[in-house]
């Protein structure tokens, strides 16, 4: 089983670069895109023809903003849009799909860099999601959370941690929420497999950051602990272009 996550920073722009051809060529069981920035009906006929798998689309109410899309090889047993709270669901940030005994959350977490109010919103989003996952775990469900977390968890996860201690994305309170998930039955599977490996998944477009290796690891797979025996690998495809993020792949047996 293969799941790929990718913040494409605008699906129409990605399609214009033929960037998604790479993702579909991997023949994933699920392809989770974030920050699609469009409604399904805004794609033209040519763009629709480039979508090589069935999909479910959750767009934000605000035009040109946020949004997630999950492509799938086999029809999921269940599809849920959002997290059941209008405060968060109006921004089109979450799709849940259930297949192969797992509940997959495709999530574009809020960015806190537009001020303290958005940091608070981001932390409330984390809190609501964790409460939901706690309930699902109590019911015996196995969960995979993937997407753009908009937070680097540890100093190893960004090039310049000291300089970014007061920057949203590496604030102590944001990092603490990622840690909270790890204390509630989840595993950061990439860091579990590669505790000392330095790789990034996002680079600002400014100052040739990607070419200079100045990045952040913002895109994750958090999985329920009981799924660890099924994990074969997590691959950060840092050389795949088409967005300011790169795709990340989870391989399960």
Image (cartoon, rainbow, N blue to C red):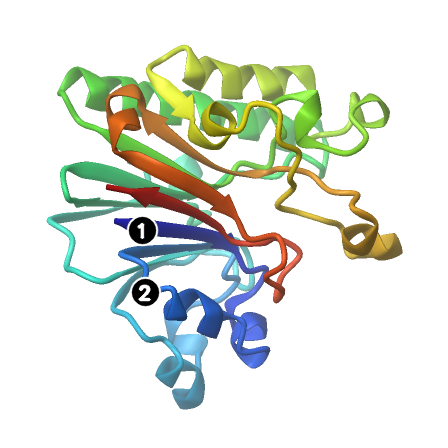
Residue 13 to residue 91: above or below: below
Residue at 54 percent of width and 23 percent of height:
123
The alpha-carbon separation of the residues under discs 1 and 2 comes to 8 Å
Residue 205 to residue 81: above or below: below
Counting residues from the start of the chain, the first of labels 1 and 2 encountered is 1
- Quadrant position of the C terminus in the picture: top left
Residue at 43 percent of width and 46 percent of height:
93
**Mark 2 burial class by Cα count in 10 Å: few <14, some 14-19, many 20+:** some
The residue beneath circle 2 is 27
Task: Residue 207: give x, y in percent of width and height.
Answer: 88, 54
Work out which residue is located at the far bottom of the displayed protein and give it.
46
Q: Nearer the viewer, residue 159 or 184?
A: 159
**What count of labels does the image hold?**
2
Question: SS of the residue at dot 1?
Answer: strand
Residue 189 to residue 232: above or below: above
Query: Quarter-wise, where is residue 150 in the image?
Result: top right
The residue beneath circle 1 is 2
Query: Quarter-wise, where is residue 41 in the image?
Result: bottom left
173 with respect to 43 (left or right): right
Task: Residue 178: give x, y in percent of width and height.
Answer: 51, 21
Task: Residue 47: give x, y in percent of width and height.
Answer: 44, 82
| Contact check, label 1 and label 2, Cβ < 8 Å | yes
């Amino acid at each position: 089983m293969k799941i790929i996550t990718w913040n494409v920073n605008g699906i129409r722009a990605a399609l214009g670069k033929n960037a998604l051809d790479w993702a579909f060529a991997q023949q994933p069981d699920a392809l989770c895109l974030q920050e699609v920035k469009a409604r399904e009906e805004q794609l033209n006929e040519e763009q629709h023809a480039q979508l090589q798998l069935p999909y479910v689309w959750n767009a934000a109410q605000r035009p040109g903003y946020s949004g997630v899309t999950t492509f799938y090889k086999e029809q999921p047993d269940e599809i849920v849009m959002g997290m059941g709270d209008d405060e968060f669901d109006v921004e089109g940030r979450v799709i849940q799909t259930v297949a192969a005994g797992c509940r997959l959350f495709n999530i574009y977490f809020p960015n806190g860099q537009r001020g303290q109010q958005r940091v608070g919103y981001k932390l409330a989003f984390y809190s609501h999601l964790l409460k939901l996952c706690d309930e699902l775990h109590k019911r015996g469900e196995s969960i995979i959370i993937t997407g753009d977390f908009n937070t680097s968890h540890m100093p190893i996860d960004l090039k310049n941690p000291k300089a970014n201690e007061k920057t949203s994305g590496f604030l102590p309170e944001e990092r603490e929420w990622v840690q909270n998930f790890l204390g509630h039955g989840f595993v950061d599977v990439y860091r579990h497999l590669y505790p000392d490996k330095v790789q990034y998944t996002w680079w600002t477009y400014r100052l040739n950051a990607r070419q200079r290796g100045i990045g952040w690891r913002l895109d994750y797979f958090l999985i329920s602990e009981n799924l660890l025996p099924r994990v074969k690998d997590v691959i950060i495809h840092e050389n795949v272009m088409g967005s300011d993020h790169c795709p990340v792949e989870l391989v399960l047996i």
